[in-house]
Image: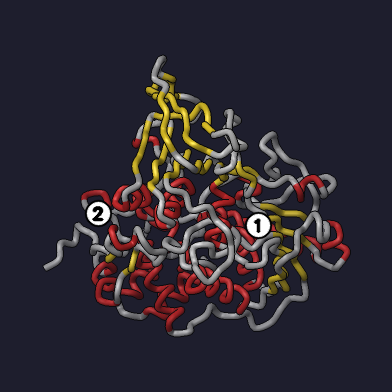
Amino acid sequence: MADVMKKIPVREQDPKVRAGNFDEVCLGYNEEEAVAEAQRCLNCKNARCIEGCPVGIHINEFIAKVKERDFTGAYQIISESSSLPAVCGRVCPQETQCEGRCVRGVKGEAISIGKLERFVADRAREEGIRPAKPEKTNGHKVAVVGSGPAGLTCAGDLARLGYEVTVFEALHKAGGVLTYGIPEFRLPKDEVVAKEVENVESLGVKICTDVIVGRTESVDELFDEGFEAVFIGSGAGLPMFMGIPGENANGVFSANEYLTRNNLMKAFRDDYDTPIFKAKKVVVVGGGNVAMDAARTALRLGADVHLVYRRSEAELPARAEEVHHAKEEGIVFDLLTNPVEILTDENDYVTGIRCVRMELGEPDASGRRRPVVIEGSEFEMACDAVIMSLGTSPNPLIASTTEGLDTNRKKCIVAEEESGQTSREGIFAGGDAVSGAATVILAMGAGKVGAKGIDAYIRGKEA
């Protein structure tokens, strides 16, 4: 008999095999495994797990349906709250959100809520089940800027309420960071992301690609075209750098560029002509999920990869699962280490990186212990490519071309937390464009807030 205090293990590709391919690492649950895991759930009446979900999925209810093998019913429950369940089941940090609140986890291991959500969403996709489309529209038009998790969620929620929604995407494919930022081995593009986008379109949402709002047309022109409200979910795609010597050398990349070439433009595939530098030894600077993605991508492209991070493993901001997978695959972690210079040859090509050793001092404003340089600890590390993964900020294009739209010192759009309303009437915003770089699920939560705010705004005008 299975131990109800322990999770049903999830099947994965062997680390030695997956380090050489871009196939999905986690294979997910099959039907019997999903039902067995669901049976561990206590179906709490006051389910704390729901409180930990930024989009408010009725977790206990959908898991109860999985127990009964009513997978369609489970999908319908999830779809009431989430437009991207197959995505969330793969990339959400459940361990700090829904699973972190799970009562079963107090004395044992929390229910694998994310893996069950993934199973239900994948099952629905395989059986051709789509979310229910509203019977009729209400005649009101809303524009959404950006087709990432915030934009798609806002669009989906508004469509369910009967709004005629058009999403404007700057790139040639919809999905935002889901398409350009997260690697294939964590989030398959054609099998998962594209299908989730199709589900949103099936609600009546129109998606227009290759439209750069702020260049192709302005926010003001969207209002002139009859849109009654605009939601800005344009993300945070502007990379940050350290400002150290050698940072402009040939062979230094932002994680954004590196991952976009590989993910959106399919550089990892032999049948695509997208160029990408396949280095022999790569140093990735950073410790977040994007750094793990860049490091694991470089490894799959044939490089020996070192990840340099100035704090200790306990302070790594990346998900524990991603760190574990990276280590399994052979990524070398150089912790308590900070770059001070990128070394180059006479032709300005990267030859190495000069670093210093760090130790942890007193806590800083974030509550984490501040890294302090150890005097005399300089050393050099040979490499032929450096990938900077130090975070991102919003592109200022929309704010700079939209009169009356307030931003803060970090160039993020200022919006009300309860409604997404900005300083300009009729313009709402959410996700990374407001918060700075954060998680997919938090962006989705902001998209839901924006949809509610827009609905209240338009209804208020009618009253």
The image shows residue 407 at horizontal and vertical percentages of 73, 40
Mark 2 lies on a secondary structure that is loop
Label 2 crowding class (10 Å Cα cut-off): few <14, some 14-19, many 20+? some
Q: Is residue 68 left or right of residue 255?
A: left
Q: Kindly identify which residue carries mark 1.
A: 450
Residue 404 vertical placement versus 359 (above, below)? below
Residue underneath mark 2: 109
Q: Name the residue located 46 percent from the left edge and 63 percent from the top edge.
A: 184
Vertical placement of residue 368 versus 374, above or below: below
Give coordinates of residue 99: x percent, y percent. 35, 54
| Label 1, residues with CA under 10 Å away: few <14, some 14-19, many ≥20 | many
In the rendered view, would you say 439 is above or below 373? below
User: Residue sitting at 41 percent across and 50 percent down?
Assistant: 303
Q: Nearer the viewer, residue 396 or 380?
A: 380
Q: Quadrant of the N terminus?
A: bottom left
Inter-mark Cα distance, 1 to 2? 35 Å
- Residue at 61% in and 43% down: 239
Farthest residue to the right: give it: 224
On the question of residue 97 being in view, the answer is: no
Classify mark 1: helix, strand or loop. helix
View extreme (front): residue: 346
- Residue 120: image tag: none
